[in-house]
Amino acid sequence: MDFLERNLELREKQRLEGHTDRVWSLAWNPAAGVSGIPAMLASCSGDKTVRIWQQDPSGSWDCLAVLEDTHTRTVRSCAWSPSGKLLATASFDATTAVWEHVGGDFECVATLEGHENEVKSVSWNASGSLLATCSRDKTVWIWEVQPGNEFECVSVLQGHTQDVKMVQWHPFLDVLVSVSYDNSVKIWAEDGDSDDWHCVQTLNEASSGHTSTVWAVSFSSNGDRMVTCSDDLTLKIWDASSNPSETSDNNCGSWRLLCTISGYHDRTIFSVNWSREGVIASGAADDAIRLFVESKENSVDVPSYKLLFKKDKAHDMDVNSVQWNPKEPQVLASASDDGTIKIWELVEVPR
C-alpha cells in the first residue's frame, strides 16, 4: 500500500488521564487485541506508578490497574514479555520489577537489582527467555529467565562511556542494540563458542552516525533495518540487508547508514517507532509527532524516506514516547511531559 498517494491524517481518538507527573514510556501488550482479548497498554511515569489501560467493547479506554508501592522513584520504561503475561518496569530507584498478570490482577513477582543507579530501559527478546536492562551506570545487563520467575544475570556489557538510554532486541534474532548519551549505537551478540556477549559493531560519528545523544531505536518488522533518533535533531535509517552472508554467519549482519532524515523537528527527538506496515513515527521536545514512509519513487538509487504527516502540538509539552499498536498498525499511542497519553488513528480523509 502506497501511503504517500493517500490523503492521511493522524486523528486523536482518546486522551488518557490519571498519571500525576510526566509519562515516560508506553508498551502495547503483544498478546492482547486479538481473538476476543481486549487491547491493553501499559504506561509509566515520574509519579512512580505504572498504569494498565484496557479497551472496552465500545472502543474507549479505561484504567484497569495502577501498579504502585513498588518503585520508590520515577518509572522510566516498561515492556511486556512476548506472551503478554509478564510486564517489566525499569526505575530510577536502580531496580527493575517484573509483574505477572494473573486473572485481573498484577503481582510483583521479581525485583532485579544490580545496576548502580537509574535504570533507563528494559526489553525482552523474541522468545521471552532473556531480558535486557540499561542504566546511567553505563552498563547493559542481560538476564536469563529461570523457572519460577527467577532471573539470573548472565552478562554485564561494558563499552558505552556514558548513560545508556535504551536497549532493544532484534525482532527475531538474539541480537541486542543499545543507544547512549555517548552518541553511539552498539550492536551486541553472543559469541557462539564462549556463550559470552560482546559488541560486534559500534555506529558512531565515524560511521556517519549521530553527533549527539541517541535516545531511541526501533526495528523494521522484517529486522533488516533500524531507525535511531537523537538530540542532533535527526533520524537515521540503518540497513543490514546488503550483507546476507554475514548475517547468516553471526546473526547480526553489518549495519550501514542508509539515509538521514533531518529538518522535521527543531528540538530533541526522544522517541521513534516503526509500525508493522512500515510507517515511522517520531516524537520530540517540540511537542510534535511526525510520520515518515519510504518513498518508492527513486528506488533505483538510495532509498529515501518522505514526510507522510506532521502533527504539531500533539501534546502540550515534550512527547516522550510514540508506540504503534502491533495488532492494529494504524493505531498509535503517545505519552508526554503533560501527564497524558493519547490514542491516535491514521485515517484516510477525503480530498
Image (tube, rainbow, N blue to C red):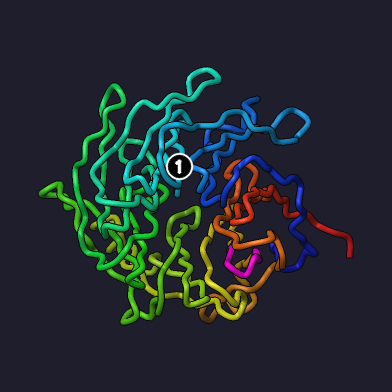
Q: Quadrant of the C terminus?
A: bottom right
Determine the secondary structure under disc 1.
strand
Q: Position of residue 125 (x, y in %)?
A: 36, 43
Q: Residue at x 44, y 24 (%)?
A: 107
Q: Is residue 178 left or right of residue 50?
A: left
Task: From the viewer's perspective, tell me whether residue 256 is left or right of residue 262.
Answer: left
Query: Does residue 287 belong to the magenta stretch?
Result: yes
Q: Nearer the viewer, residue 189 or 295?
A: 189
Residue 44's spot in the image, x, y percent?
51, 44
**Among all residues in the image, which is located at the extreme left?**
194
Kind of residue at badge 1: Ala
Compared with 292, 50 (above or below) is: above
Name which quarter of the figure residue 258 lies in. Answer: bottom left
User: Between residues 16 and 283, which one lies in front from this camera angle?
Assistant: 16
| Range drawn in magenta | 281-289
Q: What is the quadrant of the N terminus in the image? A: bottom right
The residue singled out by tag 1 in the image is 79
Asked if one can make out residue 148 in the rendered structure from this viewpoint, the answer is yes
Please name the residue shown 57% across and 49% down the image.
21
Residue 90 is situated, as x and y percent measured from the top left of the image, at: 39, 44
Looking at this rendering, what residue extends furthest in the right direction?
351
Does the segment drawn in magenta span residue 338?
A: no
Q: Is residue 307 above or below residue 177?
A: below
**Residue 317: % across, % down:** 64, 62
- Residue under the image location 25 percent in, 28 percent down: 146
**Within-10-Å neighbours for mark 1: few <14, some 14–19, many 20+:** many
Q: Left or right of 331: which side holds 202?
A: left
Task: Please determine whether, in this image, residue 249 is positioned above or below residue 26.
Answer: below
Q: Residue at x 52, y 44 (%)?
A: 47
Question: Looking at the image, can residue 247 be seen?
Answer: no
Residue 106 relative to residue 243: left or right: right
